[in-house]
Amino acid sequence: MRTKVHNNASKFKLFLIFFLVLIALYILKSRLSSSPPAQESTSLQSSSAIHQTPSCTKIPLSLASTIIHYATSNVTPQQTLNEISVAARVLQKKSPCNFLVFGLGRDSPMWSALNHGGRTIFLEEDASWIQAVKREFPALDSYHVTYDTKVSEAEELLELRKSEECTMVGDHDMKRSKCPLALRKLPSVFYEVEWDLIMVDAPTGFFAGAPGRMGAIYTAGMAARGRREGETDVFVHDVDRVVEDKFSRSFLCEGYLQEQEGRLRHFVIPSHRTTAGIGFCP
């Protein structure tokens, strides 16, 4: 069993490194193709200069650091290869874009690299962990957040799906929401940006006293509905657990469920501002 797990982890790491290298090559190709062509010259001196070796085009430092990190580390990301591939396919189409991740983990450098040129921010509950990660990856854009809920309250909070104050859509200001599930104390950047992708992989939710992901799931769905136009891809990890399963189905809506791979669900939620009379769920 140990040999099989080790082999799977090795294959995963090789695939991840290969994928990141492809991104680096794509960036280099884009930069070279966008460079202006050399001007023609009639002089022998200018003609010979054309054949000189072109200047070196470097890949971004953050991407290089990410490749080195996964090439030299024995630690693999929390999600499986198939689960990561779901969001990676969406990023391939949408990046550079605005990508919000609930949680700062060992896969954070990967998510940031896959959205190269876009804005990727991480919301993390553990301040000491943020400092530890920043020492290794100072370029990651992370913020400390706190939560007021507990997993032990999940069943009671799930009943809020029937509450009008928690299901109002359209021009809805999250900071003034009266819904107990709304996260009103997030960093200002959350409310200022329209997010193209949201990954809910935090906060902690595996014991009764943990904050749980009830508020994160609800807030992700409302952020998607409240954007001016377009749609938001929302991903929820660990849907094998009761909270993630029930809250994603109830507040992100089964009608918006695009696919499920392993423990990851992918929802595509449209703006509710641009369609009059649209309900909370289709």
Image: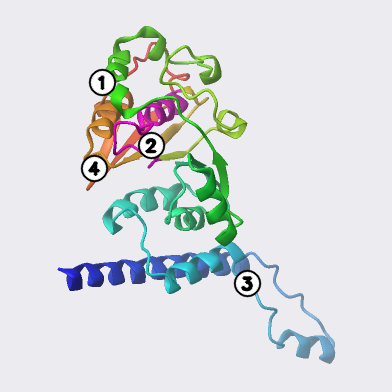
Crowdedness of circle 1 by 10 Å Cα count: few (<14), some, many (20+)? few
| Residue 179, x across and y down, in percent | 43, 14
Q: In this rendering, does residue 219 appear at all?
A: yes
| Residue 3, x across and y down, in percent | 19, 73
* Horizontal relation, residue 195 to residue 42: left or right: left
Residue 248 lies in quadrant: top left
Q: Nearer the viewer, residue 142 or 222?
A: 142
Amino acid of disc 1: Glu
Q: Which residue is mark 4?
A: 260
User: Mark 2 or mark 1, which has the lower sequence index?
Assistant: 1
Q: Which residue is mark 1?
A: 155
Q: Nearer the viewer, mark 1 or mark 3?
A: 1
Residue 10 lies in quadrant: bottom left
Crowdedness of circle 3 by 10 Å Cα count: few (<14), some, many (20+)? few
| Residue 275, x across and y down, in percent | 42, 18
Amino acid of disc 3: Lys
Amino acid of disc 4: Gln
Q: Which residue is mark 2?
A: 234
Q: CA distance from mark 1 to mark 3?
A: 52 Å
Q: CA distance from mark 4 to mark 3?
A: 38 Å
Amino acid of disc 2: Val
User: Mark 1 or mark 4, which has the lower sequence index?
Assistant: 1
